[in-house]
Image (tube, helix red, strand yellow):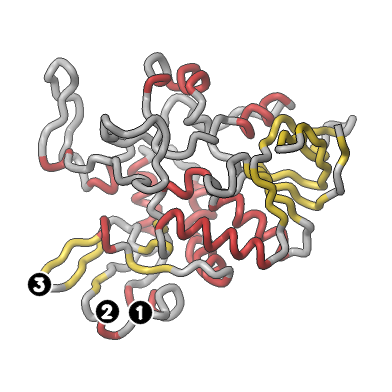
Amino acid sequence: MASATEYDVIVVGAGNAALCAALSAREQGARVLVLEKASEEERGGNSTFTAGGFRFVHDGLEDLRRDVLSDLSDAEARQIYIPPLPADLYLHDLMKVTESLSQEELAGLLIGRSRETVMWMKSKGVRFIPMFGRQSYKVNGIHHFYGGVNIEAVGGGWGLVDFLVKAAERAGIEIRYRTGLRKLLQEKNGAVSGVLAFGPDGYEEIHARAVVLACGGFEANPEMRTRYLGPGWELCRVRGTKHNTGDGIRAALDIGAQAYGGWSTCHAVQWDISAPPFGDRVVLDNFQKHSYPLGIVVNMAGERFVDEGADFRNYTYAKY
């Protein structure tokens, strides 16, 4: 078992959160290593399977054109209406969809820094455009946006990850593919001092002053799905990557980290019955079925079990 060079920060995972953490640490002068369990071709975790959409505070289209959408032409702008998203509306929507379970302190941090975070990402090379495909409807030739998530990265989730990987490479951040976390290393006083990783050359202890666990949830682990979500969940199809098997969660719990948050619910959507067991990197999230507000949903016994028209799709699709 070899001992490697010491790093300042090890980031486990290579999705949006992980790469942003790596870039932020590098910005402060840290020597950063990113460990990506997947191959280079399958990198990006579940971020790749998203639409790359962002919800952040702004004052409408003209405000967005000053910085976020600075390359939008006048002709394009005349065909778009994006309503403002003030902080109080953002908080209202967040509390609405979480049934007021969001912590106000964390919600305030999320909302208060949302605009500057998007601008920071843009400074790293991420390009943004209006999300025409699923967040607007056309009235008299004008695209009216709704629901708050009106801006996406060019290329969707795949484009978002690609922008950030290229930014990491430019910044001199080392990324090791096919290298997964096995456990966290500790000093005698309990401080985390690195990771035990498994890569193409076998096991390796890699030491660092700090470790960031940004390697996703356990949705691709049928045993953990069944344990925390209940019987039957081992049979579901996974919308995203096959690599999110709860490695970071297990490693943290193994050294005594406190379990926190909701464990018995998840983000689940209506999914095509012909979809593969895990996400398709060409089809991405387009196996979703969003027609339920226009009809009724029944179970195997022909019984309705949800109020299909309770609210706009943006507020109910993950819940249903």
**Residue at the front extreme?**
201
Residue placed at 54% from the left, 65% from the top?
Answer: 121
Helix, strand or loop at label 3? It is loop
Mark 3 residue type: Asn
Mark 2 residue type: Glu
Helix, strand or loop at label 1? It is loop
Residue 207: x %, y % from top left = 83, 42
Query: Which comes before the other along the chain, label 3 or label 2?
Result: 2
Quarter of the rendering occupied by the C terminus:
top left
- Distance, label 3 to label 1, CA atoms, is 20 Å
> Closer to the observer: label 3 or label 2?
2
Q: Which residue is mark 3?
A: 140
Residue placed at 68% from the left, 52% from the top?
Answer: 175
The answer to whether 19 appears left or right of 242 in the picture is right
Residue placed at 71% from the left, 37% from the top?
Answer: 199
Residue placed at 41% from the left, 65% from the top?
Answer: 154
Q: Is residue 210 above or below residue 30?
A: above
The answer to whether 68 appears left or right of 288 in the picture is right
| CB under 8 Å between discs 3 and 1 | no
Q: Which residue is mark 1?
A: 72
